[in-house]
Image (spheres, helix red, strand yellow):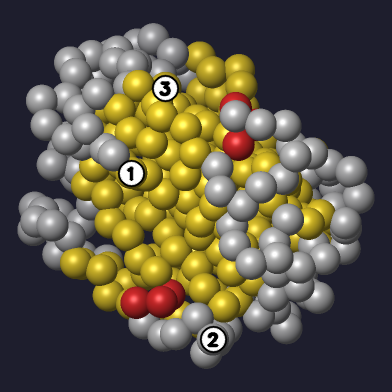
């Protein structure tokens, strides 16, 4: 089966011992016949104020049993902690496609712009327009009153879609990388969607803890047991005056739904944040 694996820097080091590079070994729940494809999303961040928000997640040394997860920073940024989810796509899941897009595929980091988009063509067309999810895996942003970045898609058809990585107002988005996953809308035992704190409150009414229950909608056969849920951040709007602290996670997972959480802590001002989620058996 395909699976969800998680990695946190706090599984390797304490949050108050920040380093530029943190990595750890992640073992798959089963041995695959060949190395599976991996799709990464950031799900938690704690980054000091006073410098650009710079975080990069990646994998290396993957085989059919394990891989090494990396969460790094650079350029004087202090990364106290971070966590990622990894969607592990078994070799037989050829009807699930994945990839990534970087703003640096469009323009150099030294020439930041508010909006970046690119048409993505599938390597194999679908019969009908698929479900497409996107989430952030790398950010370099700063020099504004808030750190603002969002990724989303539109123009989905059987052959491809348009991916966007944007910022707004006075934020400088030097670069961003988003992962994407596409699968047939009627595929069995999988469902997905998005959620945002603005589903439950206005952006200008910041609060530290935000949550809401979601009921799964299925295009194919529904779950017969509690699923695994992948969560990746797709939207961040957090004041730059204090540390950027955000943690996305799920609770009360059942075959019919789950509760999402987008939380901060201490003196962080969380205006809004959003996630993409993928649940699968």
Rate crowding at label 2 as few (under 14), some (14 to 19) or many (20 or more) other CA atoms within 10 Å.
Answer: few
Q: Can see residue 103? A: no
Judge whether 110 appears above or below 170 on screen.
below
- Residue occupying the point 43% across, 39% down: 260
Rate crowding at label 3 as few (under 14), some (14 to 19) or many (20 or more) other CA atoms within 10 Å.
Answer: many
Q: Is residue 244 left or right of residue 123?
A: right
- Residue occupying the point 14% across, 64% down: 65
Residue placed furthest toward the bottom: 17
Name the element at disc 1. Answer: strand
Q: How many labels does the image show?
A: 3
The residue tagged 2 is 16
Name the element at disc 2. Answer: loop
Q: Position of residue 84 (x, y in %)?
A: 43, 59
Q: Kindly report the distance in space between the C-alpha atoms of the residues bearing marks 3 and 1.
A: 24 Å
Q: Where is residue 66 in the image (x, y as percent from the top left)?
A: 20, 67
Please report whichever mark, 1 or 2, sits nearer to the chain's N-terminal start. 2
Q: Which of 228 and 272 is in front in this view?
A: 272
Q: Quadrant of the N terminus?
A: top left
Judge whether 45 appears above or below 1 on screen.
below
Specify the label residue 131 is tagged with: 3
The residue tagged 1 is 251
Please report whichever mark, 3 or 1, sits nearer to the chain's N-terminal start. 3
Q: In this view, does 117 lie to the left or right of 25?
A: right
Q: Where is residue 91 in the image (x, y as percent from the top left)?
A: 19, 44
Q: Kindly report the distance in space between the C-alpha atoms of the residues bearing marks 2 and 3.
A: 40 Å
């Amino acid at each position: 089966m395909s699976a969800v694996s998680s990695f946190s820097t706090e599984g390797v080091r304490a949050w108050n011992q920040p380093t530029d590079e943190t990595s750890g070994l992640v073992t798959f729940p089963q041995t695959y016949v060949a190395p599976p494809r991996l799709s990464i999303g950031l799900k938690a961040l704690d980054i000091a104020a006073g410098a650009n928000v710079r975080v990069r997640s990646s994998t290396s040394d993957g085989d059919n049993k394990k891989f090494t997860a990396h969460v790094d920073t650079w350029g004087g940024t202090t990364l106290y902690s971070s966590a990622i989810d990894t969607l592990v796509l078994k070799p037989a899941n050829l009807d699930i496609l994945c990839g990534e897009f970087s703003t640096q595929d469009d323009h150099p980091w030294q020439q930041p712009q508010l909006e970046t988009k690119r048409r993505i063509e599938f390597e194999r067309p679908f019969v009908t327009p698929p479900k497409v999810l996107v989430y952030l895996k790398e950010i370099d942003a700063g020099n504004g009153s808030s750190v603002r970045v969002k990724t989303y898609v539109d123009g989905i058809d059987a052959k491809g879609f348009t991916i966007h990585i944007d910022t707004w107002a006075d934020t400088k988005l030097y670069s961003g990388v988003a992962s994407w996953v596409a699968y047939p809308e009627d595929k069995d035992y999988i469902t997905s969607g998005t959620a945002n704190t603005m589903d439950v409150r206005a952006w200008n009414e910041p609060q530290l803890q935000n949550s809401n229950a979601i009921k799964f909608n299925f295009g194919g056969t529904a779950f017969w047991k509690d699923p695994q849920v992948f969560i990746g951040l797709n939207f961040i709007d957090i004041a730059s005056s204090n540390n950027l602290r955000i943690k996305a996670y799920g609770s009360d997972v059942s075959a019919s739904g789950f509760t999402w959480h987008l939380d901060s802590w201490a003196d962080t001002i969380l205006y809004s944040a959003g996630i993409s989620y993928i649940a699968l058996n």
